Structures are given as structure tokens and as C-alpha cells.
Amino acid sequence: MSALHAARAPVGVVWCIALSGVVLALEHPLALAALLAAVLVAGVAAGAGRQLRLALVYGVPFALLIALVNALVVRDGLTVLVRGWELPWGPMDITLEALAHGLVLGARALIVLLVWALHSAAVDPDELLRAFRRLSLRSGLTAALAVRLMPVLARDGRRLADAQRCRPGEPASKLALLRAVSAGALDRATDVAATLEVRGYGLPGRPPRRRRPWSRHDLAFAASAAGLVALVVLARPAFEAYPRLEAAGGPGAVLVCAALAVLVLAPFAARRGVEAGAPHPHAWRAPA
């Protein structure tokens, strides 16, 4: 349980979008390093260490692949590391600037992946769907049920495949397995529809729900998102990869990078109103 769990889901999504936009707007290596460290610390503070480790397992090779492709494709830059490297499509020079810029692009992709891994771990998807209930209640309810039933159907498919492998003779085709899972999905949909009808979903005259007032966590993450965007717009540290590497240095650039990290982590420092180890306040619960 963390401050991001306690904040309302739309605010958490806006914060993640703002943080991703800031990451994509920056190219300064020190700023990206500060944001990477801040996102990792925020993930640990939110109890999302496992999700971030999984994102790193997939994201680091992807980031290195981006750097390698950029170094092989882009021929700009004055500092040649490998000259005349023979490739199937001809000789190619690899420059330090292309390699460095590729690492920057890979780092940005990795940080964005970590931000949304944190979002998946700490922002309640059901509350996010409920935020759009005034636009289309039935569409939001349908999307929420679809998201909830997809893992159930995947488990059904695995169990049916295991059962088929235990039977003698030729295993059933994938089409037969798909038909069985589809039939189970229709049965589940009928049961869910009957349950919703009994509980009165879709009936007119339901009393309006009271709006939940903004908490300190909502205000903190909203202020963090606004501060991140304003800081990047007003004081983005300069970085140029071509034709020669040039990065802004000095106390000003270091101060901006430190301010970025502080703005990311500041909302997580508010522990008041957050109970450690308690269930998510807006988590979905199965009907009794």
C-alpha cells in the first residue's frame, strides 16, 4: 500500500502520462539517469518491486537492441569507432555519437516501460473504468468484465489442454480447444448477466453516487505532474548528439536533474492516511 494506491485512479493515470511525456521530451543522460533511479525507488516504495524486475528483464534487452540498431543505421557523427565495417548491404561506419544517441533512445523506452509497469501495479483498473461511467455505463461495465474474465478464460484453456494431453490417442486440435473455451465463455457470460440482472444493474432510478473529495494524495500527484511538465518546459537541460556530443553541464543542469527526481518521489513521502499492508481501497471484490 502506497500513496499511489491511495490516490484516485484518474490522477494516477495523469501522473504516469505526464511522467512518460517528460521522459520522452528529455535526452540529457544525467536527467534520464535521475528519472530512472526515481522510478525504481518509487516502484519499491509502492511495493511493485516484482513488476519492475519483470519489466527490467524484458526492457533492458529491448533498450540495448534500440541502441545497436541506431548505431548500425545512423551514419551521422564525427567520432568514428569502427570504419568500413563490412555488412551484407555494404561498408558501414559506426560512430560514437550514433551509439550514444541509441543508448539515450533505449533508456527512454526502458523508463517509459517501468512507469507503466508501476501504473499496472498501483492504479486500480476498475476505478479507472468507473471514472467513465457518465460517458457510457454499459461500455465501462463490459470492459471491466472482459478484463476480469480474460485470465479466467486463459486458465480454462490451459486446463483443457492439460486434460487433452492426458487422454490416449491423438490430441484434440486447437480449433476444438477454442470451441470448448468459447462455449465456457458463453456460459460464464450468461451467469454474469443473470447475476447483474438480479442485482439491478441497468435499471432506471438509481441514486447518484456521492463524489469522493480530493485527498492529499490526489493533490500531491496532480502537483507532481504539473511540476514535472513545467520544469521540463522552462528548464530542460540541453543535449546534442550530432555532429558531436554536447551536453549541458554545471550546477544548473545538476539542479534540474535533482529537481526532476524530487518531483517524482515527493508524493510517495506522504504516508498519512496510507495503511501499510492493507488491501487496495478500491480493489475489486467478488460478489458474495
Image (cartoon, rainbow, N blue to C red):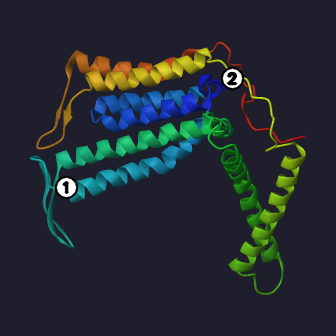
Horizontal side of 194 relative to 173 (left or right) equals right
Considering the image in quadrants, where does the N terminus appear? top right
User: Eyeballing the image, is 252 above or below 159?
Assistant: above
Looking at the rendered structure, the kind of residue marked 1 is Val
Q: Which mark is residue 179?
A: none
Is 137 placed left or right of 259 in the picture?
right
Q: Nearer the viewer, residue 191 or 110?
A: 191
Residue drawn 74% across and 66% down?
157
As measured in the structure, the alpha-carbon distance from the residue carrying label 2 to the one carrying label 1 is: 53 Å
- Number of the front mark, 2 or 1: 2
Return the x and y of residue 39 as percentages of the image width and height. Answer: 47, 31
Q: Which residue is mark 2?
A: 211
Of residue 219 and residue 73, the one placed in the foreground of this image is: 219
* The quadrant where residue 203 appears: top right
Residue 273 location (% of width, % of height): 68, 15
Residue drawn where x is 43% and y is 29% of the image: 37
Q: Residues within 10 Å of mark 1 (few under 14, many from 20)?
A: some
Q: Quadrant of the C terminus?
A: top right
Residue at image coords 59%, 26%: 4
* SS category of the residue bearing label 1: loop
12 relative to 275 in the view: left or right: left
Instruction: Determine which residue is flagged by label 1.
Output: 74
